[in-house]
Amino acid sequence: MHPRNKHANGYDLSDLSEATPELTQFIINKPNNQSTIDFSDARAVLLLNKALLFRHYGIKFWDLPQQFLCPPIPGRADYIHALADLLADDHDGIIPTGKKIKCLDIGTGANLIYPILGSAEYKWQFVGSDINPIAVKVADNIAKANKLPVKVKQQTDSNAIFKGIITKDSYFDITMCNPPFHASELEAQQGTQRKWKNLGISKTAKQLNFGGHAPELWCKGGELSFITNMIKESAQFGKQVGWFTSLVSKKDNLPALTKCLKQHHVKRHKIIKMLQGNKQSRFIAWQF
């Protein structure tokens, strides 16, 4: 994990249980006497996330309706820290902090996780957008309850990403996105089945420990289509954004995305790799 990631050395479940006592009933001991939780249990995962946010990020209230995505926080934190490094490259190697740095989180979701982490770690100011009105309401409640420097806006146009969110008077130092990476609900369910198989757990396809639904997990054409549309639309806002970025789940999509960037005459672009345990992830960044 990133060297500034608070979770690089795992979890202290005893400490986290003090922040969220309900977590205690979900802690189990492995044969080597190390403590863990059952990561196939959606309630256990939710409480673990809540405890992490309470203990490490100054959050006092955080809860999600059952259908919404409950994100694994360590990986989300890596994206935030990598974005900080990207901004530092343009600031003589010094990470810019404070509310003067403005970030846009596309598809922030009900969990509001990136604005929470970014404001806690670097005091950045955020706008989070989402197309789901219930997600917007839940995220807005979380922001207000914790007095976060976050404004949550609903994207009312299903064909737009930045339009209606970036106004003519606004500027963002960076935009970020964790796009829906599956092309259909069936593909998402098949991915879940593979995950359970790899974990040696018997679960039905619709049982998701981290939850999620359309448009959080899938959209027509999957992440390649989504990010391609993002690149095309970003050209209209090139002077209002320092860096556009998006996670790319499937590395096989990188050649097509790189070609799309060149077709839209970006000034420069980067592919930045991140490593969480045995999992390799990455995001693509571009500017005009």
Image: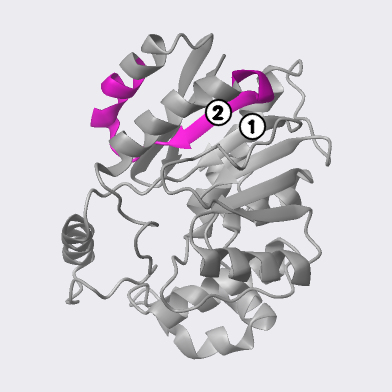
Does dot 2 land on a helix, a strand or a loop?
A: strand
Give the image quarter of residue 152: bottom right
Give the image quarter of residue 92: top right
Q: In the drawing, does residue 68 fall left or right of residue 250?
A: right
**Which residue is denoted by mark 1 in the rendering?**
174
Q: In terms of depth relative to the viewer, which is nearer, 191 or 229?
A: 229
Identify the magenta region.
238-258
Asked if one can make out residue 62 in the rendered structure from this viewpoint, the answer is yes
Quadrant the C terminus occupies: top right
Q: Residues within 10 Å of mark 2 (few under 14, many from 20)?
A: many
Give the image quarter of residue 145: bottom right
Instruction: Determine the residue positioned at 52% across, 31% down.
Output: 245
Kindly check if marks 2 and 1 are in contact, taking CB atoms under 8 A apart as contact. Answer: yes
Reply yes or no: does residue 254 show up in magenta.
yes
Instruction: Determine the residue positioned at 54% across, 84% down.
Output: 23
> Compared to 250, does 151 lie above or below?
below
| Kind of residue indicated by mark 1 | Ile
Asked if one can make out residue 272 in the rendered structure from this viewpoint, the answer is no
Closer to the chain start, of discs 2 and 1, is 1
Q: In terms of depth relative to the viewer, which is nearer, 1 or 90?
A: 90
Residue 204 x/y as whole percent: 18, 76
In whole angstroms, how far apart are the C-alphas of marks 2 and 1?
A: 6 Å
| Kind of residue indicated by mark 2 | Phe
Q: In the drawing, does residue 143 fall left or right of residue 7?
A: right
> Compared to 190, does 161 lie above or below?
above
Reply yes or no: does residue 230 show up in magenta.
no
**Which residue is denoted by mark 2 in the rendering?**
244
